[in-house]
Each structure stands twice: as structure tokens, then as C-alpha cells.
Image (tube, grey):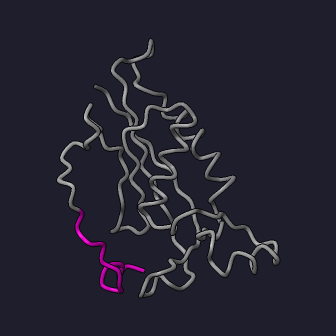
Amino acid sequence: MYSATTEIHFAYGHRLLDYVGKCAHPHGHNARVEVEVESEQLDIAGMALDFTVLKHGLQDWVDAHLDHQMILRHDDPLVPILQNMNEPIYIMERNPTAETLASLLYEIAQQQGFSVAMVRFWESPTSYATYRPTLVSANGSQAGDTGRRPPRMIGPETREEH
């Protein structure tokens, strides 16, 4: 299996609802996104994927939808205020965390026809979240799934980098 990874960068603002800490307030980041694709074979030029094709395909979507946008959850009270001010916003179903943004960009890259293995979303130089799909077995269980999930901590101690 071959893999190829490229990076894209963009600036955005967001805040997290149902969260206690600095990220509950509007703030911004300079995102760095790594997108890894996989291929069992190389093309005639000896590449798993032309980096330029992946980078520009996804970068064009990001530039049009996320770059210099305020990314908010659909029920955020700021949504109608910013819409009335004609401010650029991107609305998500879930909180715009590094995790959900990694998942979003994974889905967009897949919709563009790329064989995506994972997306790593850096929201600061020292903090990132990675999304990769979980393999599901024939009986419907996920590989390595014990059926138990650790509780998700919320509070300022979990996202101090902002």
C-alpha cells in the first residue's frame, strides 16, 4: 500500500457551545491540515496521487467555504447576528472542534473522489485531532471496539492552548 500526504492551511474563527473554558468564546486559529490518501498501485508516472490534484481540489473547497469564516454550530446564537451583518460564516451540525473539522474535511475529500486514509487537523502548532474511518467487521462490530467509551472531559484543562 502506498500513501501520499499533502497539507493545506487556512484561517478561521469559531467557538464551542456546551463547553467550559476559553474556547466557549469567539476566537481564531491558523489551521494546518494533513490529508493522507492511499493507493495499492502507482500511476504511469510512478505516483500514488499527484499532490497538486489533491491539494488544489481540497484547498479550493476550503477557500470557498472555511477560510476566513466564522465556523459555528447551527444553534449558536451568533448565527443570526452574523448573518444579519452579512459576515462570512460556515454552519455545522456539531461543534466546530478540531475533531469535527477533521471529519468534515475527510468527507469532502472523499466526495471529491480521493481514497482518503486519514485527515489530521492542527488547530495550533502543538495540538491536533485525527480522523480516520473505523473498519467494521462482517458482524457489525468495529475493530478493537470493546463497547465502552471513556468519558469526554470538558473544561479548561482539556484545551489550554487557545
Give the quarter of the figure containing the C terminus.
bottom left
- Residue located at (82% from left, 77% from top): 84
Residue 91 on the magenta segment? no
Residue 155 on the magenta segment? yes
> Which of 62/92 is in front?
92
Q: Is residue 9 left or right of residue 115?
A: right
Outermost residue, front side: 139
- Residue located at (55% from left, 80% from top): 27
Above or below residue 17? Residue 41 is above
The residue stretch that appears in magenta: 149-162
Task: Provide residue 28's location: percent of width, then percent of height.
Answer: 55, 75
> Which of 141/47 is in front?
141
Q: Quadrant of residue 66?
A: bottom right
Q: Is residue 39 left or right of residue 71?
A: left
Q: Quadrant of residue 83?
A: bottom right
Task: Provide residue 76's location: percent of width, then percent of height.
Answer: 62, 77
Task: Provide residue 123's location: percent of width, then percent of height.
Answer: 44, 66
- Residue located at (33% from left, 68% from top): 126
Above or below residue 127? Residue 114 is above
Above or below residue 26? Residue 135 is above
- Residue located at (58% from left, 65% from top): 11
Instruction: Give the overall secondary structure of the magenta segment.
Output: loop
Task: Provide residue 101's location: percent of width, then percent of height.
Answer: 49, 59
Above or below residue 53? Residue 58 is below
